[in-house]
């Protein structure tokens, strides 16, 4: 049985990240703050941790690809797949027409 994915609004995500970043000094660690705040938002601590990590990367506080960079990579990968498919179709069409030209009877 798979888990059902819950979509949280951007406002809930931003609020959760803001709460963690503002209140982490009141807890023993960032993880402790996350565990304290997540139930109040109605999400799991792991979900909130991922939101915080993404926000930290986007703000330059943590190394790694930003959300914009990841989105651009997805777009380029999708475009690359489409171009490979188109090239394969063109290659097969070219081979088909080349074979048809060879099979044609000379006049």
Image (cartoon, rainbow, N blue to C red):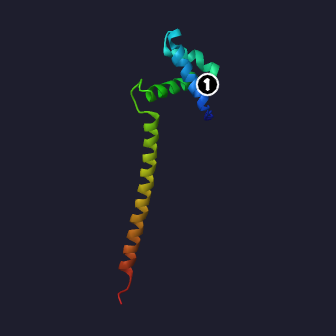
Q: Residue at x 64, y 19 (%)?
A: 40
The residue identified by callout 1 is: 43
- Foreground pick, 68 / 27: 68
Could you tell me residue 52's position as x and y percent? 50, 24
| Badge 1: residue crowd in 10 Å (few <14, some 14–19, many ≥20) | some
* Residue 24 on image: x %, y %: 51, 14
In the displayed structure, 16 sits above or below 6; it is above
Secondary structure of the residue carrying numbered label 1: loop
- Answer left or right for 54 relative to 40: left
Q: Quadrant of residue 69?
A: top left
Residue at 49% x, 12% y is: 29
Which residue is found at the position 39% from the left and 69% from the top? 94
The spot of residue 81 in percent (x, y) is 44, 52
View extreme (bottom): residue: 107
Percent x, y of residue 11: 60, 29
Quadrant where the image shows the N terminus: top right
Which quadrant holds the C terminus?
Answer: bottom left
The one of 85 and 25 positioned closer to us in this rendering: 25
Classify residue 26 as left or right of residue 94: right
Q: How many marks?
A: 1
Q: From what the image shows, is residue 27 above or below residue 9?
A: above
- From this view, report whether residue 89 is shown above or below residue 60: below
């Amino acid at each position: 049985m798979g888990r059902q994915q819950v979509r949280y609004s951007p406002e809930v995500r931003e609020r959760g990240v803001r709460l963690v970043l503002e209140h982490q000094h009141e807890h023993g660690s960032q993880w402790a703050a996350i565990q304290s705040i997540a139930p109040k938002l109605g999400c799991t601590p792991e979900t909130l941790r991922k939101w915080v990590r993404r926000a930290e990367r986007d703000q330059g506080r943590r190394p790694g690809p930003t959300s914009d960079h990841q989105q651009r990579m997805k777009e380029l990968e999708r475009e690359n797949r489409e171009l490979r498919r188109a090239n394969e179709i063109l290659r097969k069409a070219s081979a088909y027409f080349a074979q048809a030209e060879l099979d044609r009877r000379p006049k």
